[in-house]
Amino acid sequence: MSVFGTVFLILAISQVYWAWRGYRFAAARIRSRALLWTVCGAVLAVYLVLYEFNMGAWRDRSTPVHLTLHDALAAGPWWWWAASSFFAFFLAILLAIPRGIVRLLRRFEKPMVPARREFLGRTAAALTAAPFVAGTYGLLYGRLNLEVTHETVRIPRLPRAFDGFRICQLSDIHIGPFMPEGEIRKYATIANAEKADLIALTGDFVTFDPDTQGPAVNALRGLRAPFGVYGCLGNHDAWAGVEDSITELFGQAGVWILRGESAAIRAGAESFNLIGVDFQTARRFGPSMPVKRLLGNIEGMVDREGANILLSHNPDTFPRAAELGIDLSLAGHTHGGQLALEFISPEIAPSRLVTPYVAGWFRKPGGQLYVNRGIGTIFVPIRVGAPPEITVYTLRCGEA
């Protein structure tokens, strides 16, 4: 079973668990059997209507590019519940293990003091409620809490003319109701205010609906930088079938999408080599077909004597990029985990199920990688522990 299949199976089990918990809660408070079944039936009917309403809209793949009443009152709360109940289910199971052990030990010890039992019950309830509180934060604030990150990158072969050169990166736009066209324009304005020398866009401009490509390009056409605006495409751009058309639209807007291509970024007589690739994966990822050799299509474009920077949506191309001598890779794709608990442990992020390169810096002999957390969301419009990010890199000569 695939990772996504496993996640949906666990989600289904979690819904059965919460239905059982809800029934027990109601049964303890409603004495009338007829009223109990009426209440439970009404709640189930509302749940099924919301499920079909939201799943039907998702299957239709038609995506508005502004926040609609349906998204605000139905889709947002639905996905809040799905994500929060999923993680709360895990916590409930983890808490059930020690509670089961305590119950077993109580058979051989004197009964637990009622006050202690009540304290443990309230603690378990508070911990189980935490994902719902975090989900509310992530929906209403976390997904909009933009961070502009400034990073210094040392590149040994960087020409002196580019010492202090600044690149601004935006990634994973995912235009839609929770990342509307107007919001993207706001982020483009923030990027322009950084006054970088070059702007890099690293893919996933749309999600599934090809009709959103025009608004996505329109929202970004105001980006300006002295050395130009360049980009690459992501897996969702491929899945939506817009790779050729969105490249043309961006070209008309003055943005150069590099699709297995390189561009010499020149300052006087000196230059560095900027390369861009479409989404590449070594194993099947959704509708994307694996390639036989990662970055095989750009091996001959690498400047063996000069500095090379790669725009690749998928950070999994990094090991091969380092082998090829690409000094710096800029990627996205992961959203930083989107629902991450890395403030507890660096290993707790859903994206680690598909890649070890979730967010921030990674280094190997021959190259370095930065994974941008992006500004949009996928599936659930929630960010926890992974705020949206615009990254500004200052290039410096010298060893990393």
Image (spheres, rainbow, N blue to C red):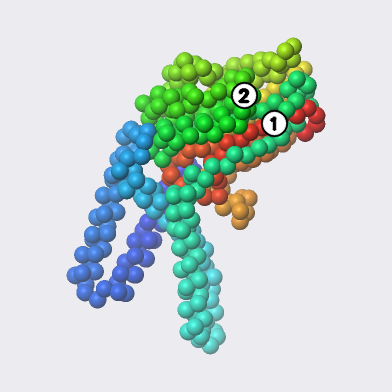
Instruction: Give the residue type at disc 1.
Output: Thr
Residue 276 image label: none
Give me the C-alpha separation between circle 2 and circle 1: 11 Å
Q: Position of residue 60 (x, y in %)?
A: 31, 34
Instruction: Give the residue type at disc 2.
Output: Leu
- Does the rendering let one see residue 30? yes
- Does the rendering let one see residue 334? no
* Residue at left offset 58%, top offset 44%: 352
**Element type where label 1 sits in the image:** strand
Quadrant assignment, res 354: top right
Q: Position of residue 318 (x, y in %)?
A: 65, 31
Q: Position of residue 175 (x, y in %)?
A: 43, 33
The local crowd at label 2, few if under 14, some if 14 to 19, many if 20 or more residues have their Cα within 10 Å, is many
Residue 394 image label: 1
Name the residue nearer the viewer: 185 or 43: 185
Residue 198 image label: 2
Q: Residue furthest top?
A: 269
Which numbered disc flags the more N-terminal residue, 2 or 1?
2
Count of all numbered marks drawn on residues in the image: 2
Quadrant assignment, res 387: top right
- Eyeballing the image, is 19 above or below 350? below
* Residue at left offset 61%, top offset 41%: 359
* Residue at left offset 48%, top offset 61%: 130
- Eyeballing the image, is 59 above or below 254? below
* Residue at left offset 42%, top offset 47%: 8
**Element type where label 2 sits in the image:** strand
The local crowd at label 1, few if under 14, some if 14 to 19, many if 20 or more residues have their Cα within 10 Å, is some
